[in-house]
Amino acid sequence: MGHGDKKAKDKKKDKKAKQASPAAAAGKADSGKLNKAGMLKREYYEKELAILHGELVALQEWVKATGARVIVVFEGRDAAGKGGSIKAITERVSPRVFRVEALPAPTEREKSQLFMQRYITRFPSAGEVVIFDRSWYNQALVNRVMGFTEEKKVERFLSLVALMERFIVDGGITLIKFWLEVDMDEQTRRFQERITDPRKTWKLSPMDLEAHRRWYDYSRARDAVFKASDSNHAPWHVLRSNDKRRARLNCIAQFLSLIPYKKAPLPKVDLPKRQKPEGYKEPDYQYRWVKERY
């Protein structure tokens, strides 16, 4: 058999193996909800998201009624989809219950404090869900990779973080940690999109470019974080995030599954009739109407 014939035969075998694999079978079964690229169709995504949003509202009412305190941590590589997942969670709930904390770089005063100090001041009170878009894990991730902190401080953080999270959980706070995992090629594609898409250029920073270069440094930092802090009392929930829509649905569904909320029956509401005008007339006022451009 010639080299070309053998190569063609091997390709044929690989194709058959893929077709027979569970992933291929699942893909065939999911063809109604997937597009040609194998990603979730928008129509399917929006339908499922609407259902999950209804559950998030029910969770919100339970949190308010019970005085529950919840922290949700989002970590992952740059361009992994953290912001989009957080937006999907919060877009239909009250910002007075679901509060997002995306802390900027520390001030000189904050640099002199204990590392956890500025995060603790943002922890939830009764009836609140606080979502951290990046968190205290900055110390062992971006700060470590970019050389913003001493290695001995990183090692100390890693040795204490599980104990600190035990303190949080034992204090009555529900702590949920999500790690969004995007692969190398997809991260590159998203960065390239940020370079060319005028809607996304604001997302691109010199830090992003350096993060792209330091892929394996981030891998090592992630591995160290998981080894130190993937505990039974505060485990990491890892989401595949190459397909953003799928990741968002899976994230919300997992979040809901981790909190023992109960749906309260909705009260019957009758819309009251409007009052009578009793002589009121619209004024002859020259409103500054916005030009209808669309």
Image (cartoon, helix red, strand yellow):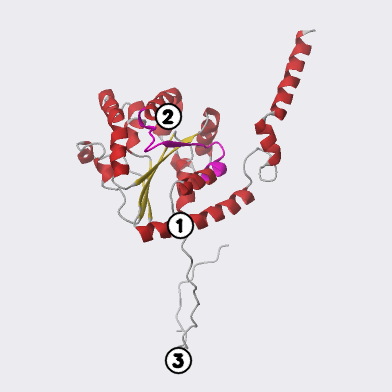
What element does badge 1 sit on? loop
Report the quarter where the C terminus lies: bottom right
- Identify which amino acid the numbered label 2 is placed on: Ala
Residue positioned 44% across, 23% down in the render: 216
Of 166 and 186, the residue lying toward us: 166
Q: x, y (%) of residue 130?
A: 36, 49
Say whether residue 79 is visible. no
- Identify which amino acid the numbered label 3 is placed on: Glu
Mark drawn on residue 211? 2
Q: Left of 176 or right of it: where is 47?
A: right
Residue, disc 1: 262
Q: Earlier in the sequence, mark 1 or mark 2?
A: 2
Say whether residue 192 is visible. yes
Q: Which numbered disc, 1 or 2, marks the residue closer to the eye?
A: 1
What element does badge 2 sit on? helix
Residue positioned 55% across, 52% down in the render: 49
Of 293 and 92, the residue lying toward us: 92
Of 155 and 268, the residue lying toward us: 268
Task: Give the spatial CA distance, label 2 vs label 3.
Answer: 66 Å
What stretch of residues is rendered in magenta? 228-248
Residue positioned 42% across, 36% down in the render: 236
Q: x, y (%) of residue 277?
A: 47, 88
Residue, disc 3: 278
- Disc 1 and disc 2 in contact, CB within 8 angstroms: no
